[in-house]
Amino acid sequence: MTKLVYFAWVRERIGKSEENVSLPAGIETLADLLSWLRGRGEEYESALLRPEVIRVAIDKEHVGHGDAIGGAREIALFPPMTGG
Amino acid sequence: MTKLVYFAWVRERIGKSEENVSLPAGIETLADLLSWLRGRGEEYESALLRPEVIRVAIDKEHVGHGDAIGGAREIALFPPMTGG
Amino acid sequence: MTAAPVPVIRIQAEDFDVAAEIARLTEGNADVGAVVTFTGLCRDEGGRLAALELEHYPGMAEAEICRIAAEAMRRWPLLGLTAIHRHGMIPPGDDIVLVVAASTHRQAAFEAASFLMDFLKSRAPFWKKEHRADGFEGSWVDAREADDQAALRWRRR
Amino acid sequence: MTAAPVPVIRIQAEDFDVAAEIARLTEGNADVGAVVTFTGLCRDEGGRLAALELEHYPGMAEAEICRIAAEAMRRWPLLGLTAIHRHGMIPPGDDIVLVVAASTHRQAAFEAASFLMDFLKSRAPFWKKEHRADGFEGSWVDAREADDQAALRWRRR
């Protein structure tokens, strides 16, 4: 099981702040994950409509969409950051 | 009469913080003034030994050595500034 | 005189005290000749906003600011570095973020504080949601292109 | 919202209160989103110094800092600008100078504060004399070439 966590409008559109999922075989990169998630329902489709604006972190470190998921325990999806 | 004021090591070497002088005819620029002052005694010679490092202000505004004294009421001579 | 200082990083709901944070970096260290602070405050956008709600990613927010601070410590000869970021509901006029950088000469303190803010803006996992004064549903603040550009300028070195 | 702010310039023997000076620029003005402060402190130069004595040219010190502050107000969209410079005998660890710049976004506040310090260093009529911890006669601090260079970089714009 992999823990997925969502923030800001990604969280609002998906309708939950976290969930545990079993990733099917073949999901190797974060781009694969985003594409698979979009097929899980309207709420995911709406949150991930423009995957290019979605930022991803694995185990609390920024990663790129092309990076491998590897042994990730926690994957976070969120919009561009607006702190400071 | 023109008021001359001195600061920092210029003041220490000349041995006073201010004085009133009658400028002789022919003293038109600040370079003329510095040169004339150097002839007034050892203490002035020691303070103004390297005229190129002396900064000058007329009526509380920075001016260059080539500038005219004009109707200056107060002329200040001092070393490069080290505030802040 | 002193060992390499450890940056102070705090993520908190409460406000901070700028004077106390300056004192923490200067007291007992007479090598400090320059302290630069940056305080970011909630604007009311011409009366439009009732508050900003700041969401963050607990754990990653601290970790990411620690990484940025460590990079600043490597780039500049700093004698102290502090970053405090608030979360939760923040009304106009209230503080959001504080950065304090201390060094012997001013250039390092100015540059490090500016660097920390540029990277904090574009990399620290915080998101602002507007709460409108007129009661209508507010929206999430969009990331500013200017903030990404500001972070990029540090790559030129 | 507000008329163009008038810079606050003070030359004084007493210490200043950074928090109070920040509050003066932010309170009641919810357009302010960024405040940068610079505090310059007296270093002890590895224990060598007992104090710095700051001499100034009364009247010209205020006038010159006013001129520099007015130039900063022309160059950046500032919502507030304060400069306070102390004179007299200042022991290590004590404050010497404070600059506070307030603006809507951070870049203007950072740049204006840095600009003000660069020009204050090279143009404001203050001179530092060292008082040594070992009791020997101290000397006048030499102007730093780096400070003149720092002021020159603003000409490139």
Image: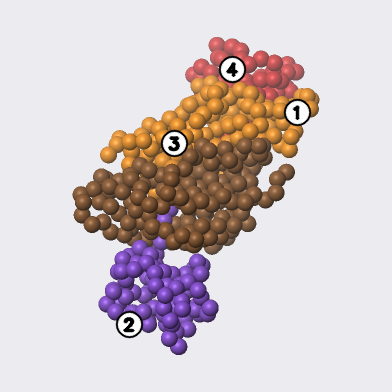
Chain colours: A red, B purple, C orange, D brown
Where is C1 relative to B7, above or below?
above
Q: Position of residue C143 (x, y in %)?
A: 65, 36
Q: CA distance from mark 4 to mark 1?
A: 34 Å
Q: Position of residue D70 (x, y in %)?
A: 59, 57
Residue type at mark 2: give it. Answer: Gly
Q: Residues within 10 Å of mark 1 (few under 14, many from 20)?
A: some
The residue located at (48%, 52%) in the rendering is: D11
Residues at marks 2 and 1, common chain? no
Q: Residues within 10 Å of mark 2 (few under 14, many from 20)?
A: few
Dot 1 corresponds to which residue?
C133
Dot 2 corresponds to which residue?
B39
Dot 4 corresponds to which residue?
A4
Q: Secondary structure at mark 1?
A: loop
Residues at marks 4 and 1, common chain? no
Q: Secondary structure at mark 2?
A: loop
Residue type at mark 3: give it. Answer: Ile
Residues at marks 2 and 3, common chain? no
Name the quadrant containing residue B38.
bottom left
The residue located at (21%, 51%) in the rendering is: D135
> From the image, which quarter does the N terminus of chain A lie in?
top right
Name the quadrant containing residue D102.
top right
